[in-house]
Image (cartoon, coloured by chain):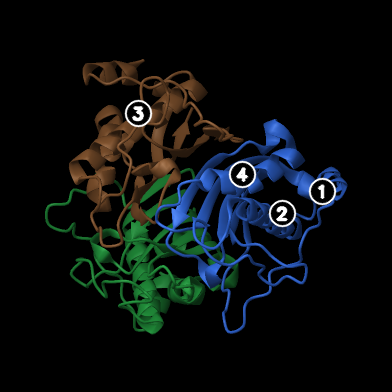
Chain colours: A green, B brown, C blue
Amino acid sequence: MEIEARLAAMGLALPPSVLPPVGVELPFSFVRLHEGIAYISGHGPQHVDGSLAGPFGKLGADVTIEVGYAAAQAVGLSMLGSLKRALGDLDRVTHWLRLHGMVNCAPDFAQQPSVINGCSHLILALYGAERGAHARSAVGMASLPFNMCVEIEAAVAYQ
Amino acid sequence: MEIEARLAAMGLALPPSVLPPVGVELPFSFVRLHEGIAYISGHGPQHVDGSLAGPFGKLGADVTIEVGYAAAQAVGLSMLGSLKRALGDLDRVTHWLRLHGMVNCAPDFAQQPSVINGCSHLILALYGAERGAHARSAVGMASLPFNMCVEIEAAVAYQ
Amino acid sequence: MEIEARLAAMGLALPPSVLPPVGVELPFSFVRLHEGIAYISGHGPQHVDGSLAGPFGKLGADVTIEVGYAAAQAVGLSMLGSLKRALGDLDRVTHWLRLHGMVNCAPDFAQQPSVINGCSHLILALYGAERGAHARSAVGMASLPFNMCVEIEAAVAYQ
Protein backbone atom coordinates (compact mmCIF):
# COMPACT_ATOMS: atom_id res chain seq x y z
CA MET A 1 0.00 0.00 0.00
CA GLU A 2 2.94 2.29 -0.74
CA ILE A 3 1.02 4.54 -3.14
CA GLU A 4 -1.84 5.01 -0.68
CA ALA A 5 0.65 5.86 2.04
CA ARG A 6 2.05 8.59 -0.19
CA LEU A 7 -1.44 9.88 -0.86
CA ALA A 8 -2.13 10.06 2.86
CA ALA A 9 1.21 11.82 3.44
CA MET A 10 0.13 14.43 0.88
CA GLY A 11 -3.11 14.90 2.81
CA LEU A 12 -5.19 13.48 -0.04
CA ALA A 13 -7.91 10.84 0.00
CA LEU A 14 -9.58 8.67 -2.63
CA PRO A 15 -13.25 9.43 -3.32
CA PRO A 16 -15.78 6.59 -3.39
CA SER A 17 -17.37 5.25 -6.56
CA VAL A 18 -19.03 7.90 -8.72
CA LEU A 19 -22.71 8.38 -7.99
CA PRO A 20 -24.56 8.68 -11.29
CA PRO A 21 -26.39 11.98 -11.61
CA VAL A 22 -30.14 11.61 -11.27
CA GLY A 23 -31.76 10.14 -14.35
CA VAL A 24 -28.58 9.23 -16.13
CA GLU A 25 -27.71 5.60 -16.59
CA LEU A 26 -24.05 4.63 -16.79
CA PRO A 27 -24.05 1.43 -18.82
CA PHE A 28 -20.29 0.95 -18.74
CA SER A 29 -17.32 0.13 -16.59
CA PHE A 30 -15.21 2.82 -14.95
CA VAL A 31 -12.15 0.64 -15.47
CA ARG A 32 -11.91 -2.19 -18.01
CA LEU A 33 -9.12 -4.70 -17.41
CA HIS A 34 -7.62 -6.71 -20.26
CA GLU A 35 -4.28 -8.51 -20.40
CA GLY A 36 -2.32 -6.18 -18.18
CA ILE A 37 -3.82 -2.90 -19.36
CA ALA A 38 -6.50 -0.99 -17.46
CA TYR A 39 -8.61 1.20 -19.75
CA ILE A 40 -10.00 4.05 -17.62
CA SER A 41 -13.24 5.83 -18.51
CA GLY A 42 -13.40 9.58 -18.70
CA HIS A 43 -13.58 10.80 -15.09
CA GLY A 44 -14.58 14.12 -13.57
CA PRO A 45 -13.90 15.58 -10.10
CA GLN A 46 -15.91 14.10 -7.23
CA HIS A 47 -17.08 15.09 -3.79
CA VAL A 48 -16.22 12.73 -0.92
CA ASP A 49 -19.75 11.30 -1.17
CA GLY A 50 -19.06 10.25 -4.78
CA SER A 51 -21.21 12.90 -6.45
CA LEU A 52 -19.70 15.01 -9.21
CA ALA A 53 -17.97 18.07 -7.82
CA GLY A 54 -17.52 21.52 -9.27
CA PRO A 55 -16.22 23.86 -10.29
CA PHE A 56 -18.61 23.73 -13.22
CA GLY A 57 -18.12 25.88 -16.29
CA LYS A 58 -15.50 26.75 -18.85
CA LEU A 59 -11.84 27.69 -18.59
CA GLY A 60 -11.36 31.06 -20.16
CA ALA A 61 -14.81 32.16 -19.04
CA ASP A 62 -15.97 30.86 -15.64
CA VAL A 63 -13.00 28.97 -14.17
CA THR A 64 -9.43 30.21 -13.56
CA ILE A 65 -6.35 28.17 -14.40
CA GLU A 66 -5.55 27.72 -10.70
CA VAL A 67 -9.02 26.35 -10.01
CA GLY A 68 -8.86 24.19 -13.15
CA TYR A 69 -5.50 22.80 -12.00
CA ALA A 70 -7.09 21.77 -8.68
CA ALA A 71 -10.02 20.19 -10.55
CA ALA A 72 -7.58 18.17 -12.67
CA GLN A 73 -5.91 16.93 -9.47
CA ALA A 74 -9.35 15.92 -8.19
CA VAL A 75 -9.96 14.04 -11.45
CA GLY A 76 -6.71 12.18 -10.81
CA LEU A 77 -8.01 11.16 -7.38
CA SER A 78 -11.26 9.96 -8.97
CA MET A 79 -9.33 7.81 -11.45
CA LEU A 80 -7.13 6.43 -8.66
CA GLY A 81 -10.25 5.59 -6.64
CA SER A 82 -11.66 3.64 -9.59
CA LEU A 83 -8.30 1.92 -10.15
CA LYS A 84 -8.17 0.87 -6.50
CA ARG A 85 -11.64 -0.64 -6.73
CA ALA A 86 -10.65 -2.48 -9.94
CA LEU A 87 -7.18 -3.68 -8.87
CA GLY A 88 -7.45 -3.86 -5.08
CA ASP A 89 -4.10 -2.11 -4.59
CA LEU A 90 -2.70 0.92 -6.40
CA ASP A 91 0.79 -0.56 -6.11
CA ARG A 92 -0.20 -3.01 -8.87
CA VAL A 93 0.08 -0.18 -11.43
CA THR A 94 3.46 -0.67 -13.12
CA HIS A 95 3.36 2.07 -15.78
CA TRP A 96 1.08 4.93 -16.63
CA LEU A 97 0.66 4.83 -20.40
CA ARG A 98 -1.71 7.42 -21.75
CA LEU A 99 -3.65 10.38 -20.41
CA HIS A 100 -6.15 12.25 -22.59
CA GLY A 101 -6.97 15.49 -20.78
CA MET A 102 -10.11 17.29 -21.92
CA VAL A 103 -10.74 20.86 -20.81
CA ASN A 104 -14.18 22.48 -21.14
CA CYS A 105 -13.22 25.91 -22.46
CA ALA A 106 -13.96 29.05 -24.37
CA PRO A 107 -12.79 29.06 -28.03
CA ASP A 108 -9.88 31.40 -27.28
CA PHE A 109 -8.51 29.51 -24.24
CA ALA A 110 -5.08 28.09 -25.07
CA GLN A 111 -3.52 26.92 -21.79
CA GLN A 112 -4.93 23.40 -21.50
CA PRO A 113 -1.53 21.95 -20.47
CA SER A 114 -1.39 24.21 -17.40
CA VAL A 115 -4.76 22.79 -16.32
CA ILE A 116 -4.10 19.10 -16.98
CA ASN A 117 -0.76 19.42 -15.13
CA GLY A 118 -2.86 19.14 -11.95
CA CYS A 119 -3.42 15.48 -12.74
CA SER A 120 0.01 14.80 -14.25
CA HIS A 121 1.82 16.27 -11.25
CA LEU A 122 -0.24 14.10 -8.88
CA ILE A 123 0.58 10.93 -10.82
CA LEU A 124 4.28 11.79 -10.96
CA ALA A 125 4.36 12.65 -7.24
CA LEU A 126 2.79 9.29 -6.38
CA TYR A 127 4.48 6.99 -8.89
CA GLY A 128 7.73 8.77 -9.69
CA ALA A 129 9.16 9.55 -13.12
CA GLU A 130 9.77 5.97 -14.22
CA ARG A 131 6.33 4.49 -13.44
CA GLY A 132 4.35 7.72 -13.64
CA ALA A 133 5.46 9.19 -16.98
CA HIS A 134 2.70 9.10 -19.58
CA ALA A 135 1.95 10.07 -23.15
CA ARG A 136 -0.44 12.98 -22.89
CA SER A 137 -2.83 15.20 -24.77
CA ALA A 138 -4.38 18.30 -23.18
CA VAL A 139 -7.04 19.72 -25.46
CA GLY A 140 -10.07 22.01 -25.55
CA MET A 141 -13.63 20.69 -25.72
CA ALA A 142 -16.79 22.55 -26.78
CA SER A 143 -18.50 21.17 -23.67
CA LEU A 144 -18.42 18.32 -21.17
CA PRO A 145 -21.11 16.29 -19.39
CA PHE A 146 -22.93 18.14 -16.58
CA ASN A 147 -20.78 21.16 -17.43
CA MET A 148 -17.72 19.66 -15.72
CA CYS A 149 -14.63 21.81 -16.33
CA VAL A 150 -12.20 18.88 -16.77
CA GLU A 151 -12.57 15.25 -17.83
CA ILE A 152 -9.66 12.82 -18.23
CA GLU A 153 -9.50 9.41 -19.90
CA ALA A 154 -6.45 7.19 -19.35
CA ALA A 155 -4.77 3.81 -19.67
CA VAL A 156 -2.24 2.18 -17.33
CA ALA A 157 -0.32 -1.09 -17.28
CA TYR A 158 -0.72 -3.31 -14.20
CA GLN A 159 0.42 -6.64 -12.94
CA MET B 1 -23.21 -16.11 -35.67
CA GLU B 2 -24.88 -15.63 -32.29
CA ILE B 3 -24.39 -11.86 -32.21
CA GLU B 4 -25.82 -11.41 -35.70
CA ALA B 5 -28.81 -13.54 -34.71
CA ARG B 6 -29.43 -11.20 -31.79
CA LEU B 7 -29.15 -8.19 -34.11
CA ALA B 8 -31.73 -9.73 -36.44
CA ALA B 9 -34.02 -10.50 -33.48
CA MET B 10 -33.81 -6.81 -32.54
CA GLY B 11 -34.84 -5.91 -36.10
CA LEU B 12 -31.44 -4.32 -36.81
CA ALA B 13 -29.10 -4.79 -39.76
CA LEU B 14 -25.43 -4.03 -40.41
CA PRO B 15 -24.76 -1.32 -42.99
CA PRO B 16 -22.24 -1.98 -45.76
CA SER B 17 -18.80 -0.39 -45.90
CA VAL B 18 -18.79 3.38 -45.65
CA LEU B 19 -18.87 5.16 -48.99
CA PRO B 20 -16.41 8.02 -48.90
CA PRO B 21 -18.09 11.37 -49.50
CA VAL B 22 -17.31 12.82 -52.91
CA GLY B 23 -13.83 14.27 -53.15
CA VAL B 24 -12.61 12.99 -49.81
CA GLU B 25 -9.96 10.32 -49.71
CA LEU B 26 -9.88 7.97 -46.78
CA PRO B 27 -6.25 6.89 -46.54
CA PHE B 28 -6.73 4.65 -43.52
CA SER B 29 -8.28 1.45 -42.24
CA PHE B 30 -11.69 1.36 -40.61
CA VAL B 31 -10.45 -1.38 -38.29
CA ARG B 32 -6.78 -2.07 -37.54
CA LEU B 33 -6.04 -5.50 -36.07
CA HIS B 34 -2.97 -6.08 -33.92
CA GLU B 35 -2.31 -8.90 -31.45
CA GLY B 36 -5.85 -9.47 -30.32
CA ILE B 37 -7.00 -5.86 -30.24
CA ALA B 38 -9.08 -4.23 -32.97
CA TYR B 39 -8.59 -0.46 -33.12
CA ILE B 40 -11.75 1.03 -34.64
CA SER B 41 -11.70 4.35 -36.52
CA GLY B 42 -14.14 7.09 -35.67
CA HIS B 43 -17.44 6.07 -37.28
CA GLY B 44 -20.58 8.03 -38.06
CA PRO B 45 -24.13 6.84 -38.81
CA GLN B 46 -24.70 5.30 -42.25
CA HIS B 47 -27.56 4.70 -44.66
CA VAL B 48 -28.08 1.14 -45.87
CA ASP B 49 -26.23 2.05 -49.07
CA GLY B 50 -23.14 2.92 -47.00
CA SER B 51 -23.38 6.71 -47.37
CA LEU B 52 -23.21 8.85 -44.28
CA ALA B 53 -26.64 9.35 -42.74
CA GLY B 54 -28.10 12.25 -40.83
CA PRO B 55 -29.28 13.75 -38.72
CA PHE B 56 -26.65 16.42 -39.34
CA GLY B 57 -26.11 19.29 -36.93
CA LYS B 58 -25.46 19.95 -33.28
CA LEU B 59 -27.02 18.62 -30.10
CA GLY B 60 -28.35 21.53 -28.14
CA ALA B 61 -29.18 23.40 -31.34
CA ASP B 62 -30.43 21.27 -34.25
CA VAL B 63 -30.75 17.72 -32.90
CA THR B 64 -32.74 16.46 -29.89
CA ILE B 65 -31.37 13.99 -27.37
CA GLU B 66 -33.79 11.31 -28.59
CA VAL B 67 -32.62 11.72 -32.18
CA GLY B 68 -28.99 11.85 -31.05
CA TYR B 69 -29.51 8.60 -29.09
CA ALA B 70 -30.79 6.92 -32.28
CA ALA B 71 -27.80 8.31 -34.21
CA ALA B 72 -25.42 6.84 -31.62
CA GLN B 73 -27.12 3.46 -32.03
CA ALA B 74 -26.63 3.80 -35.80
CA VAL B 75 -22.94 4.55 -35.20
CA GLY B 76 -22.75 1.32 -33.20
CA LEU B 77 -24.17 -0.56 -36.19
CA SER B 78 -21.58 1.09 -38.47
CA MET B 79 -18.76 -0.01 -36.15
CA LEU B 80 -20.19 -3.55 -35.96
CA GLY B 81 -20.38 -3.65 -39.77
CA SER B 82 -16.71 -2.71 -40.01
CA LEU B 83 -15.82 -5.25 -37.31
CA LYS B 84 -17.65 -7.99 -39.21
CA ARG B 85 -15.75 -7.16 -42.39
CA ALA B 86 -12.46 -7.19 -40.45
CA LEU B 87 -13.06 -10.30 -38.31
CA GLY B 88 -15.52 -12.32 -40.40
CA ASP B 89 -17.74 -13.08 -37.40
CA LEU B 90 -18.86 -10.72 -34.63
CA ASP B 91 -18.75 -13.65 -32.19
CA ARG B 92 -14.95 -13.34 -32.26
CA VAL B 93 -15.16 -10.18 -30.13
CA THR B 94 -14.34 -11.29 -26.58
CA HIS B 95 -14.36 -7.94 -24.72
CA TRP B 96 -15.29 -4.41 -25.56
CA LEU B 97 -12.51 -2.26 -24.12
CA ARG B 98 -12.90 1.43 -24.85
CA LEU B 99 -15.47 3.71 -26.42
CA HIS B 100 -14.74 7.39 -27.03
CA GLY B 101 -18.07 9.04 -27.83
CA MET B 102 -17.88 12.45 -29.50
CA VAL B 103 -21.00 14.61 -29.72
CA ASN B 104 -21.20 17.60 -32.08
CA CYS B 105 -22.82 20.16 -29.82
CA ALA B 106 -23.52 23.70 -28.77
CA PRO B 107 -21.22 25.07 -26.03
CA ASP B 108 -23.95 24.82 -23.38
CA PHE B 109 -25.01 21.24 -24.12
CA ALA B 110 -24.15 19.01 -21.17
CA GLN B 111 -25.94 15.67 -21.71
CA GLN B 112 -23.43 13.81 -23.87
CA PRO B 113 -23.84 10.57 -21.84
CA SER B 114 -27.57 10.42 -22.67
CA VAL B 115 -26.66 10.54 -26.37
CA ILE B 116 -23.79 8.04 -26.38
CA ASN B 117 -25.94 5.61 -24.38
CA GLY B 118 -27.56 4.77 -27.74
CA CYS B 119 -24.36 2.98 -28.71
CA SER B 120 -23.53 1.60 -25.25
CA HIS B 121 -27.01 0.10 -24.83
CA LEU B 122 -26.74 -1.62 -28.22
CA ILE B 123 -23.37 -3.15 -27.35
CA LEU B 124 -24.60 -4.34 -23.96
CA ALA B 125 -27.79 -5.78 -25.47
CA LEU B 126 -25.77 -7.74 -28.01
CA TYR B 127 -22.77 -8.82 -25.92
CA GLY B 128 -24.10 -8.80 -22.37
CA ALA B 129 -22.55 -7.14 -19.33
CA GLU B 130 -19.42 -9.31 -19.16
CA ARG B 131 -18.26 -9.01 -22.78
CA GLY B 132 -19.96 -5.72 -23.58
CA ALA B 133 -18.87 -3.49 -20.69
CA HIS B 134 -16.44 -0.79 -21.77
CA ALA B 135 -14.47 2.17 -20.46
CA ARG B 136 -16.20 5.19 -21.91
CA SER B 137 -15.94 8.92 -22.48
CA ALA B 138 -18.86 10.94 -23.82
CA VAL B 139 -17.72 14.46 -24.65
CA GLY B 140 -18.63 17.59 -26.60
CA MET B 141 -16.88 18.56 -29.84
CA ALA B 142 -16.78 21.96 -31.56
CA SER B 143 -17.65 20.21 -34.83
CA LEU B 144 -17.44 16.88 -36.64
CA PRO B 145 -16.73 15.89 -40.25
CA PHE B 146 -19.57 16.56 -42.69
CA ASN B 147 -21.52 18.00 -39.75
CA MET B 148 -22.29 14.53 -38.35
CA CYS B 149 -23.97 14.79 -34.94
CA VAL B 150 -22.14 11.82 -33.37
CA GLU B 151 -18.82 10.09 -34.04
CA ILE B 152 -17.46 7.20 -31.97
CA GLU B 153 -13.96 5.67 -31.83
CA ALA B 154 -13.44 2.34 -30.06
CA ALA B 155 -11.23 -0.63 -29.29
CA VAL B 156 -12.22 -4.26 -28.68
CA ALA B 157 -10.40 -7.48 -27.85
CA TYR B 158 -10.93 -10.43 -30.20
CA GLN B 159 -9.75 -13.97 -30.65
CA MET C 1 17.37 3.47 -41.89
CA GLU C 2 15.03 2.82 -44.81
CA ILE C 3 12.26 5.11 -43.54
CA GLU C 4 14.67 7.99 -42.97
CA ALA C 5 16.06 7.50 -46.47
CA ARG C 6 12.52 7.87 -47.83
CA LEU C 7 12.02 11.02 -45.77
CA ALA C 8 15.21 12.49 -47.19
CA ALA C 9 14.14 11.53 -50.72
CA MET C 10 10.91 13.45 -50.13
CA GLY C 11 12.97 16.47 -49.05
CA LEU C 12 11.68 16.25 -45.48
CA ALA C 13 13.58 16.33 -42.18
CA LEU C 14 12.78 15.37 -38.61
CA PRO C 15 12.56 18.26 -36.14
CA PRO C 16 14.44 18.05 -32.83
CA SER C 17 12.75 17.49 -29.49
CA VAL C 18 9.95 19.93 -28.70
CA LEU C 19 11.07 22.97 -26.75
CA PRO C 20 8.55 23.65 -24.03
CA PRO C 21 7.00 27.10 -24.34
CA VAL C 22 8.20 29.53 -21.71
CA GLY C 23 6.69 28.90 -18.32
CA VAL C 24 4.99 25.64 -19.19
CA GLU C 25 6.24 22.44 -17.63
CA LEU C 26 5.76 19.22 -19.56
CA PRO C 27 5.62 16.53 -16.88
CA PHE C 28 5.16 13.66 -19.28
CA SER C 29 6.81 11.55 -21.95
CA PHE C 30 6.43 12.32 -25.63
CA VAL C 31 6.45 8.60 -26.35
CA ARG C 32 5.66 5.90 -23.79
CA LEU C 33 6.86 2.39 -24.67
CA HIS C 34 5.15 -0.68 -23.26
CA GLU C 35 5.24 -4.25 -24.55
CA GLY C 36 5.58 -3.47 -28.23
CA ILE C 37 3.25 -0.49 -28.37
CA ALA C 38 4.44 3.12 -28.45
CA TYR C 39 1.86 5.53 -27.05
CA ILE C 40 2.51 8.93 -28.64
CA SER C 41 1.52 12.18 -26.90
CA GLY C 42 -0.48 14.82 -28.71
CA HIS C 43 2.01 16.64 -30.97
CA GLY C 44 1.84 19.97 -32.78
CA PRO C 45 3.90 21.31 -35.69
CA GLN C 46 7.48 22.37 -34.89
CA HIS C 47 10.13 24.67 -36.26
CA VAL C 48 13.53 23.16 -36.97
CA ASP C 49 14.76 24.56 -33.64
CA GLY C 50 12.09 22.52 -31.83
CA SER C 51 9.80 25.41 -30.97
CA LEU C 52 6.11 25.14 -31.79
CA ALA C 53 5.41 26.37 -35.31
CA GLY C 54 2.38 28.06 -36.76
CA PRO C 55 0.11 28.53 -38.43
CA PHE C 56 -1.83 29.38 -35.29
CA GLY C 57 -5.58 29.79 -35.30
CA LYS C 58 -8.72 27.95 -36.36
CA LEU C 59 -9.69 26.14 -39.51
CA GLY C 60 -12.81 27.74 -40.91
CA ALA C 61 -11.69 31.13 -39.62
CA ASP C 62 -7.94 31.87 -39.76
CA VAL C 63 -6.38 28.87 -41.52
CA THR C 64 -7.20 27.40 -44.96
CA ILE C 65 -7.52 23.67 -45.61
CA GLU C 66 -4.33 23.70 -47.70
CA VAL C 67 -2.37 25.32 -44.89
CA GLY C 68 -3.97 22.98 -42.33
CA TYR C 69 -2.98 19.99 -44.48
CA ALA C 70 0.65 21.18 -44.43
CA ALA C 71 0.44 21.67 -40.65
CA ALA C 72 -0.83 18.10 -40.24
CA GLN C 73 2.13 16.86 -42.28
CA ALA C 74 4.43 18.85 -39.96
CA VAL C 75 2.74 17.21 -36.97
CA GLY C 76 3.53 13.85 -38.53
CA LEU C 77 7.19 14.86 -38.74
CA SER C 78 7.10 15.91 -35.06
CA MET C 79 5.71 12.52 -34.08
CA LEU C 80 8.30 10.72 -36.20
CA GLY C 81 11.05 12.78 -34.55
CA SER C 82 9.82 11.71 -31.11
CA LEU C 83 9.52 8.09 -32.26
CA LYS C 84 13.10 8.14 -33.54
CA ARG C 85 14.36 9.46 -30.21
CA ALA C 86 12.37 6.75 -28.38
CA LEU C 87 13.16 3.79 -30.66
CA GLY C 88 16.49 4.76 -32.20
CA ASP C 89 15.38 3.75 -35.70
CA LEU C 90 12.05 4.45 -37.43
CA ASP C 91 12.34 1.08 -39.20
CA ARG C 92 11.42 -0.57 -35.87
CA VAL C 93 7.80 0.55 -36.34
CA THR C 94 5.94 -2.51 -37.63
CA HIS C 95 2.35 -1.20 -37.74
CA TRP C 96 0.67 2.13 -37.28
CA LEU C 97 -2.37 1.45 -35.13
CA ARG C 98 -4.33 4.54 -34.22
CA LEU C 99 -4.27 8.22 -35.09
CA HIS C 100 -6.55 10.70 -33.30
CA GLY C 101 -6.47 13.91 -35.33
CA MET C 102 -7.69 17.05 -33.57
CA VAL C 103 -8.40 20.19 -35.58
CA ASN C 104 -8.81 23.58 -33.90
CA CYS C 105 -11.81 24.94 -35.75
CA ALA C 106 -14.84 27.15 -35.99
CA PRO C 107 -18.15 25.47 -35.05
CA ASP C 108 -19.27 25.24 -38.69
CA PHE C 109 -16.05 23.74 -40.09
CA ALA C 110 -16.74 20.20 -41.31
CA GLN C 111 -13.71 19.10 -43.35
CA GLN C 112 -11.43 17.74 -40.64
CA PRO C 113 -10.52 14.65 -42.71
CA SER C 114 -9.09 16.83 -45.51
CA VAL C 115 -6.79 18.44 -42.92
CA ILE C 116 -5.63 15.31 -41.10
CA ASN C 117 -4.90 13.65 -44.46
CA GLY C 118 -1.66 15.69 -44.40
CA CYS C 119 -0.39 13.37 -41.66
CA SER C 120 -2.01 10.17 -42.96
CA HIS C 121 -0.58 10.66 -46.44
CA LEU C 122 2.91 11.15 -44.99
CA ILE C 123 2.69 7.97 -42.93
CA LEU C 124 1.39 5.96 -45.89
CA ALA C 125 4.09 7.39 -48.20
CA LEU C 126 6.79 6.38 -45.72
CA TYR C 127 5.49 3.05 -44.46
CA GLY C 128 3.27 1.83 -47.30
CA ALA C 129 -0.30 0.55 -47.05
CA GLU C 130 0.44 -2.58 -45.03
CA ARG C 131 2.52 -1.03 -42.23
CA GLY C 132 1.14 2.49 -42.48
CA ALA C 133 -2.62 1.93 -42.42
CA HIS C 134 -4.23 3.15 -39.21
CA ALA C 135 -7.58 3.48 -37.49
CA ARG C 136 -8.31 7.19 -37.52
CA SER C 137 -10.53 9.91 -36.15
CA ALA C 138 -10.41 13.47 -37.49
CA VAL C 139 -12.49 15.75 -35.30
CA GLY C 140 -13.12 19.38 -34.37
CA MET C 141 -11.89 20.90 -31.10
CA ALA C 142 -13.05 24.09 -29.41
CA SER C 143 -9.40 25.07 -28.97
CA LEU C 144 -5.89 23.66 -28.70
CA PRO C 145 -2.84 24.57 -26.60
CA PHE C 146 -1.02 27.74 -27.67
CA ASN C 147 -3.69 28.12 -30.39
CA MET C 148 -2.10 25.39 -32.53
CA CYS C 149 -4.32 24.57 -35.53
CA VAL C 150 -3.72 20.81 -35.44
CA GLU C 151 -2.73 18.31 -32.74
CA ILE C 152 -2.44 14.57 -33.27
CA GLU C 153 -2.20 11.71 -30.75
CA ALA C 154 -1.24 8.22 -31.96
CA ALA C 155 -0.17 4.67 -31.17
CA VAL C 156 2.11 2.37 -33.16
CA ALA C 157 3.40 -1.18 -32.79
CA TYR C 158 7.16 -1.68 -32.78
CA GLN C 159 9.68 -4.47 -32.42
Residue A72: x and y in percent read 38, 72
Q: Do the residues labelled 2 and 1 touch (CB within 8 Å)?
A: yes
Q: Do the residues labelled 1 and 4 touch (CB within 8 Å)?
A: no
Residue B135: image x %, image y %? 36, 48
Q: For the residue labelled by badge 3, is the local secondary structure a helix, a strand or a loop?
A: helix
Q: Which chain carries label 2?
A: C
Q: In this view, does A159 lie above or below A7?
A: above
Number of other residues with Cα within 10 Å of mark 2, as a class: few under 14, some 14 to 19, many 20 or more: many
- Badge 3 sits on which subunit? B
The amino acid type of the residue labelled 1 equals Leu
Q: What residue type is labelled 3?
A: Leu
- Name which residue lies at 33% across and 77% down: A61
| Residue at left offset 34%, top offset 75% | A71
The residue that mark 3 highlights is: B77
Question: Exactly how many numbered labels are in the figure?
Answer: 4
Residue type highlighted by circle 2: Leu
As helix, strand or loop, the secondary structure at mark 2 comes to helix
Residue carrying label 4: C117
Q: Nearer the viewer, mark 2 or mark 4?
A: 4
Please say whether residue C75 is visible from this viewpoint. yes
Q: Mark 1 or mark 4, which has the lower sequence index?
A: 1
Q: Mark 1 lies on which chain?
A: C
Nearer-the-camera pick, C105 or A156: C105
Does mark 4 fall on the same chain as mark 3? no
Q: In which quarter of the image is residue C124?
A: top right
Residue nearest the observer in this picture, A82 or A110: A110
**What amino acid is labelled 4 in the image?**
Asn
Badge 2 or badge 1: first in the primary sequence: 1
Disc 1 element: helix
User: Does residue B45 appear to the left or right of A52 in the view shown?
Assistant: right
* Distance between mark 3 and mark 1 Cα atoms: 39 Å
